[in-house]
Image (cartoon, rainbow, N blue to C red):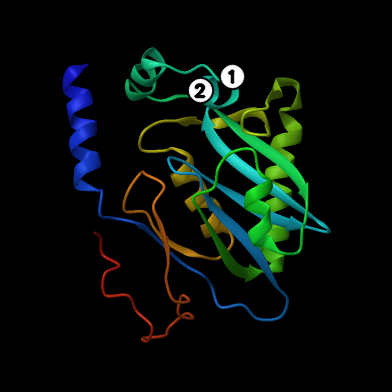
Amino acid sequence: MAFRTVLVGLLSITLAGCSNLVRPPETQGDPAEVLLLDHGRHASLGLPRDAEIVRYAYGDWRWFALGRRGIREVVRILSGGTEAGLGREIRPDPGDRSSLRRRLRVPVQQAFSITVPRSRVASLTRELEELYRQRLETAVVNPDYGLTFVRHPEGYGLMHNSNHQVAAWLRALGCEVDVRTPFSRWRIGSRAPTAGSETDRDPTNGGS
């Protein structure tokens, strides 16, 4: 167990200067603005829906949904994959997206606005809402995060945490995402080139 703790510590030091690079897609037709929210250790994603913002989050079920914290929970998470939860929060769209971060119960260190095709937002929203509805019988409210959680089918672990899941959601929105660290460190790059383009390539895209 001590070796695992040391290993995680070394990994943290090694990746301290890295950030996860997000390159938005080219948008044609009807664009939409989504919010990538950096909460320090974890991330969440805000999707527009009519006059609302629906915030989705992913995390360890016991820690994130049930609020059970402490060294035993940390050891449990580091020991292998655990059960996960999908969190959801619905808020009125304030129009000024920068004000949304001040209204959330969980602190937001950084908020990134990303423009993507509205059709992709609608598709991802349908997918997440369907997953959420299918598991409503497992719903748990965590007022500390302002989220209602349901069980998520994919297990949680150091190499598949909230940041990896948010990266997967961003890819579903058409973004290119280079995950270089399991921690909530994000950077927005230039738009991803269209298919077949030889321009606008990021020379650092091979890793940190």
Q: Amino acid at mark 1?
A: Leu
Q: Residues within 10 Å of mark 2 (few under 14, many from 20)?
A: some
Q: Residue 63 has which mark?
A: 2
In the image, residue 166 sits, relative to residue 48, either above or below, namely above
Query: Residue at image x 24%, y 48%?
Result: 15
State left or right for residue 152 relative to residue 181. Answer: right
Q: Nearer the viewer, residue 152 or 1?
A: 1
Q: Position of residue 32 (x, y in %)?
A: 69, 68
Q: Residue 66 has which mark?
A: 1
Q: Position of residue 106 (x, y in %)?
A: 59, 38
Q: Position of residue 146 (x, y in %)?
A: 68, 34
In the image, residue 142 sits, relative to residue 42, either above or below, namely above
Query: Residue at image x 83%, y 59%?
Result: 50
Label 2 sits on a secondary structure element that is: helix
In the image, residue 54 sits, relative to residue 117, either above or below, namely above
Query: In the rendered structure, are the residues bearing label 1 and label 2 in contact, judged by CB atoms less than 8 Å apart?
Result: yes
